[in-house]
Image (cartoon, grey):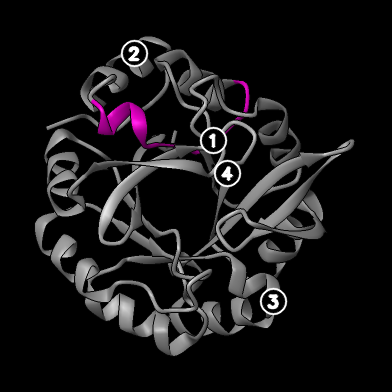
Amino acid sequence: MIAKRIIPCLDIKDGRTVKGVNFEGLRDAGDPVELARRYSEEGADELVFLDITATKEKRKTLIDLVEKIALKIDIPFTVGGGIGSTDEIADLLHAGADKVSLNSAIVRNPDLINKAAQQFGSQCIVAAVDAKRTGGQWTVFISGGSQKTGKDVLQWIKEVEKRGAGEILLTSMDQDGTKEGFDIELLQKVNEFLTIPVIASGGAGTKQHCIDAIKKGRADAVLAASIFHFGEIAISELKEELEKAEINVRKTM
């Protein structure tokens, strides 16, 4: 059985790690380079770096910060935020990223998924989907959660998989930062048809929430921020709890 992954997330604004609730009310969570080093040493399976205001500010991802972090870690590293072309993807992979996370740009130009997957391989392309309940369905939001697209989340995920994305980073905007648990219903709906891995994001507050995302939601990985940033749960403790729940995880060194 493939091991389930624990992935800390660094949301970056003005060169600092931040965390909010429902994508709002951001507060400082520390130096991203130091946090990245710590998580790598503590046994995180991967690290995600999201420059959360790059798209709204119409600028590129902070590539110098990506380079600094890449030098401090020895785990797979996914970078997202403000990426709009294959040239920018190439620059980030050259700077030390192992994968790129694409969100707003692929909603506006879905062909970018095809081009990127063909040029760099699907394993490098993560389609990030920010989902919010609207009526009886989930709708895709872009630009750091500030812009409603009208796209149905389930249909959009089917499309990005077909176009060549190698993984889905699925964030529930309703649950984000609440520490009340992942959106299990959304995960279940997505995993009824998805054949590529899905990373559950938004809502982690306890070890049980992570267990539920994997066992009930069938997530391949769980992503969390504040519970790690503010020392509420240690990665090693979370992995121990997952093992007790008979979930296969990579051993912490």
- Cα separation, mark 1 vs mark 4, equals 7 Å
- Cα separation, mark 2 vs mark 3, equals 41 Å
Q: Which residue is mark 3?
A: 108
- Give, as a three-letter code, the residue at label 1: Asp
- Cα separation, mark 4 vs mark 3, equals 19 Å
Q: Earlier in the sequence, mark 1 or mark 4?
A: 4
- Give, as a three-letter code, the residue at label 3: Arg
- Residue 52 lies, with reference to residue 120, above or below; the image says above
Q: Whole-percent x and y of residue 180? A: 54, 19
Q: Are marks 1 and 2 in contact (CB under 8 Å)?
A: no
Q: Earlier in the sequence, mark 1 or mark 2?
A: 1
Label 2's element? helix
Q: Which residue is mark 2?
A: 241
Q: Earlier in the sequence, mark 1 or mark 3?
A: 3
User: What segment carries the magenta color?
Assistant: 216-230
- Cα separation, mark 2 vs mark 4, equals 23 Å
Q: Nearer the viewer, mark 1 or mark 4?
A: 1
Q: Is residue 203 left or right of residue 75?
A: right
- Give, as a three-letter code, the residue at label 2: Glu
Q: Earlier in the sequence, mark 2 or mark 3?
A: 3
Front residue of 126/34: it is: 34
